[in-house]
């Protein structure tokens, strides 16, 4: 029977899919440098939190599949996996609605100054209402960076609130964006300068890392709201701290940071105009169940020698290991 290593336990639906079909080992640790001995004994690896790099992949000749119960693969060396004939299973669209709803919740919360209002009201400061720190969103422009599944749901929610939607995605044609009823931004500079709310929906890549930095923050409106439910390294956190602490922009709502788990003493946490959640946008029971089932079923299919369709690196099937299947 094949052995599948889990960095951390899956939500119950995923564990049920694996039950009795493979030997399951759980490490509660996802750093491939630390769990290399266990990885070398595994046929499959389901990675929730952590990373697997080239060194580990090349040191694990028995490894046949890597799975992510989500769509982010910045924690996996895709090139190394592909070169070694290892499909990287993902769970597309499983959490799109949940993440889009969370982005909407962050936007609504910071636009209505709910964090400070709750804190001050609990202290007996009813006069916090006289601060007039809330914002009506109808008629404002939301800049949506990226136009994948999550972004499309989020844009639809914003449009339903009466907001104008401005989209930048160099990989999506203007016709597709305008066909959805939204405006297309020629570049990020146009989006930053013309948006009242900016929401990030792109993967972490060399070109997107620190896309929010001192320069881009300087382009934004003084009352701009920033939302990030994508990846923490899209934002230069030192630059964001400066922008929020000096009121260069009004507020930010973040579900992701560079370091996760997030350290309690993070400088951003001292700011009253920051709302943060612990990378839980996709952690609804509904989305989690779909994602873990897709990851588990894909893992089992690959181990059976089947060409599972939901892989991030479909070119892997050109590898000699997959010829004749």
Image (cartoon, rainbow, N blue to C red):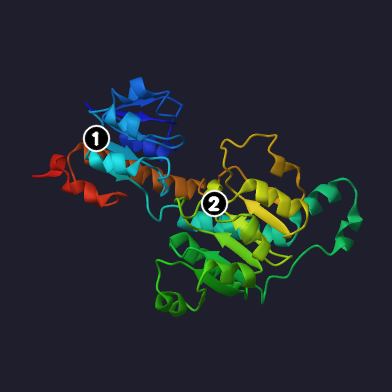
**Foreground: disc 1 or disc 2:** 2
**Position in image of residue 172 (x %, y %):** 40, 69
Q: Is residue 35 left or right of residue 322?
A: right
The residue carrying mark 1 is: 64
Above-or-below relation of 28 to 168: above
**Position in image of residue 61 (x %, y %):** 23, 28
- Whichever of labels 1 and 2 marks the residue nearer the N terminus, that label is 1
**Position in image of residue 120 (x %, y %):** 85, 49
> Which mark is on residue 234?
2
- Mark 1 and mark 2: Cα distance apart in space: 31 Å
Q: Between residues 13 and 157, which one lies in front from this camera angle?
A: 157
Above-or-below relation of 7 to 217: above
Q: Is residue 198 left or right of residue 31?
A: right
Classed neighbour count for the residue bearing mark 2: other residues with Cα under 10 Å, few (<14), some (14–19), many (≥20)? many
From this viewpoint, which residue is outermost toward the left? 324
Classed neighbour count for the residue bearing mark 1: other residues with Cα under 10 Å, few (<14), some (14–19), many (≥20)? many
Image quarter hosting the C terminus: top left
Q: Between residues 39 and 122, which one lies in front from this camera angle?
A: 39
> Which mark is on residue 175?
none
From this viewpoint, which residue is outermost toward the top? 37
């Amino acid at each position: 029977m094949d052995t599948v290593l889990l960095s951390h336990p899956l939500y119950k639906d995923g564990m049920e899919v694996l039950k009795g079909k493979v030997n399951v080992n759980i490490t509660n640790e996802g750093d491939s440098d630390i769990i290399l001995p266990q990885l070398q004994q595994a046929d499959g690896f389901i990675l929730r939190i952590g990373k697997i790099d080239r060194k580990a992949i090349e040191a694990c000749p028995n490894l046949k599949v890597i799975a992510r119960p989500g769509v982010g693969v910045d924690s996996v060396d895709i090139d190394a996996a592909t070169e070694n004939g290892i499909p990287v299973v993902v769970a597309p669209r499983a959490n799109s609605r949940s993440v889009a709803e969370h982005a909407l919740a962050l936007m609504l919360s910071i636009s209505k100054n709910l964090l400070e209002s709750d804190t001050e009201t609990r202290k007996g400061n009813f006069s916090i209402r006289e601060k007039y720190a809330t914002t009506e969103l109808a008629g404002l422009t939301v800049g949506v960076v990226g136009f994948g599944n999550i972004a499309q749901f989020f844009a639809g929610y914003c449009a339903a609130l009466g907001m104008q939607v401005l989209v930048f995605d160099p990989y999506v044609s203007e016709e597709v964006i305008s066909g959805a009823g939204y405006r297309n931004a020629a570049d990020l500079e146009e989006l930053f300068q013309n948006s009242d709310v900016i929401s990030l929906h792109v993967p972490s890549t060399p070109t997107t890392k620190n896309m929010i930095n001192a320069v881009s923050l300087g382009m934004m409106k003084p009352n701009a709201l920033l939302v990030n439910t994508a990846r923490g390294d899209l934002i230069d956190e030192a630059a964001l701290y400066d922008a929020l602490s000096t009121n260069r922009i009004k507020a930010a709502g973040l579900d992701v940071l560079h370091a996760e788990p997030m350290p309690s003493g993070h400088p951003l946490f001292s700011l009253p105009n920051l709302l943060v959640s612990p990378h839980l946008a996709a952690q609804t029971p509904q989305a989690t169940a779909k994602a873990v089932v897709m990851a588990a079923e894909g893992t089992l299919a690959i181990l059976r020698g089947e060409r599972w369709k939901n892989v991030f690196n479909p070119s892997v099937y050109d590898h000699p290991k997959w010829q004749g299947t």
